[in-house]
Image (tube, rainbow, N blue to C red):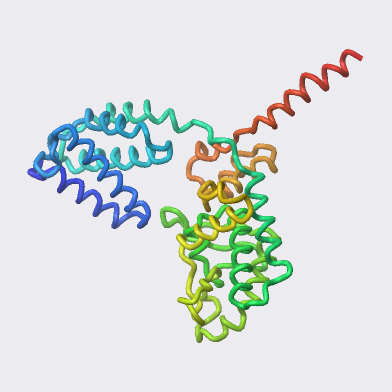
Amino acid sequence: MTDLTLQDALQKFLDEVAASRSPNTHKAYCQAVARFAETLSARDISPTLTPVSSLSVDWMGWYIQDLHNASVATEQLYITAIRAFYEYAAAEEWAPVNLPALHRLCRRRARREAARLPPFPRAEIEKILETVAQAATPPPHDERELLRVLRDRALLHVLADTGLRVSEACGLTRGHLDWTEARARVLGKGNREAIVRFSERSLRYLRAYLDARAELDGKQGRPLSALPIFARHDKGAGERVLPLSPRSAEKIVEEWTVAALGERARGTITPHTFRHYFVTVVLRGSGGNVRLAQELARHRSITTTQRYTHLSDDELDRGYHRIFNESGSESEE
């Protein structure tokens, strides 16, 4: 056992996460730990005064109960984070944690993970893609506006046709992309290297954007391979080729969502929605090949991919009509 307080133990756990996991994972785990501390404080258990040796599975039950209003994704992430802390504390022999009981408790709550996603806005995303494509024809006369429109068209089609996460897309450099093989090597979630395929239209739009940017790229005094594929084109960047940030990419998606669907649609489509679109298109185009979709989307668990196998009400109506009405009328004849 140890004299560590719960707060000290949680900080040591977060330090370990920072050293071994991605910055995004560390940030999410910090948020989960803060929420866990709130749960305990609300029940008069002070993390700064309570020894970690008092760690109880009951606390996890309270924590899960307090997450009932969170989204399914947030709930699962936060439970995973605090479960990892319990396992870390047990491995360090800081507390006599009943791990089988902890895992049973988490599994019971994790049944929500199988819940289907809400009806998928496929038509809306295709409207956004159509709108941004039309904006580039004819091309704007202003050079900066031209680069922005060509970049946005390329970015949205890359998100839709590759399944790249927005951070991965913003991290691409020209050297990452193999034009001949139509693929790129990316460092994805969990610092795992992976190959991502590109469609013909996404490469066509990328080529048009980079060709228009050729003069600007040539002024940088750096190898072309080191330059970002998606760059800023604002007054702050000036003549420099600076990488587009994920937050700026989110704003681009929001702007084109409003342009295509109206102000009421603001906030309804995000870069991650384009990733959902990609998985859904792969599933439908492959006849429901979940394994193929899992590999192309780079999901670690096939359960994640299976969440996208939903069908819309219209598809269900058509399927029912085809099976029971069309086939039934033929048999009567």
Of 27 and 108, nearer the camera is 27
Q: Is residue 260 above or below residue 75?
A: below
Residue in the picture at 32% in, 55% down: 20
Picture mark count: 0
Residue 57 relative to residue 173: left or right: left
Q: Quadrant of the N terminus?
A: top left
Furthest residue toward top: 332
Q: Position of residue 103 (x, y in %)?
A: 32, 30
Of 232 and 13, nearer the camera is 232
Residue in the picture at 19% in, 31% down: 56
Residue in the picture at 80% in, 20% down: 325
Of 143 and 168, nearer the camera is 143
Q: Position of residue 136 (x, y in %)?
A: 69, 67
Furthest residue toward front: 263
Q: Is residue 195 above or below residue 95?
A: below
Q: Quadrant of the C terminus?
A: top right
Residue 137 relative to residue 33: left or right: right
Q: Is residue 275 visible?
A: no
The image quadrant that residue 283 belongs to is top right
Q: Is residue 128 visible?
A: yes
Residue 287 relative to residue 19: left or right: right
Q: Position of residue 277 (x, y in %)?
A: 60, 46
Residue in the picture at 33% in, 26% down: 104
Q: Position of residue 72 (x, y in %)?
A: 43, 36
